[in-house]
Amino acid sequence: NLIYSYGTITTLSKKYGKLESIWEHSNKVSFYSAELAKMINAKNIIEDITISGLLHDLGKIIIVSLESENMKKISGIASQKNIASHLVEELVMGINHAKLGGMIAEHWNFPENLVRAIEYHHSPGFATEEFIPLTYCVYLANSMTEYEKGMVSFRILSKEVLDYFKITNDEVLDKLHKTLKTRYEQRLKDNKE
């Protein structure tokens, strides 16, 4: 897993540049995913969950690198119309970054669990039983970063994922978010010291 993540990051950074905002987001999703895994006692797959969180936007890196102007337009439309950007990507380009990322990961012979977590990080309902913990952790972690920006709310999150994590209302979701954010900020502080 370390080789997959390091090799992917190194290869893409050399070819497409640093893309710092995507890497910062991916690091946060990776951390949140690992914390969520601990909460559901999925410690046996925490390494896979951490790597999946780190690589979940693999397809976005490719699209941004090759179609930066289109991605700016897509982001603008999504923001203006309050529509998820992956849905606009699919309408405009015929594929979204999650599906593309899954295809790339599969082409690069990543393990199937990583492929599915990348592919389904916006559509967790497609995950088969064996990939549910992994996919749900990455989905919810990614959603928590969007929740921070006011882009998602309790009512639009996957009911299956909410039930899986026993998130029953806005207050529970907000409490979970605050816990994750506090732990992440503490980790950043610890790393600086």
Image (cartoon, rainbow, N blue to C red):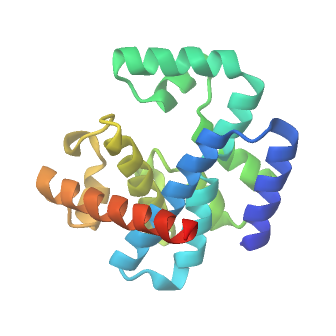
Residue 119 percent location from the top left of the image: 58, 49
Can residue 169 be seen from the camera position used here?
no
> Closest to the observer: 149 or 44?
149
Vertical side of 143 occupied by 89: above or below:
above
Q: In this rendered view, identify the residue nearer to me: 49 or 20.
A: 20
Residue placed at 73% from the left, 63% from the top? 5
Residue 177 x/y as whole percent: 29, 57
**Quarter of the figure that contains the C terminus:** bottom right
Instruction: Determine whether, in the image, residue 124 is placed left or right of residue 92.
Output: left
Instruction: Give the residue at x 20% y 54%.
Output: 174
Residue 171 sits in quarter: bottom left
Q: Residue 17: which quarter of the image?
A: top right
- Whether residue 180 sits left or right of residue 70 in the image: it is left
The N terminus sits in image quarter: bottom right
The image quadrant that residue 115 belongs to is bottom right
Residue 124: % across, % down: 43, 52
Q: Residue, x 46% and y 14% (percent of image)? A: 77
Q: Residue at x 73, y 36 (%)?
A: 62
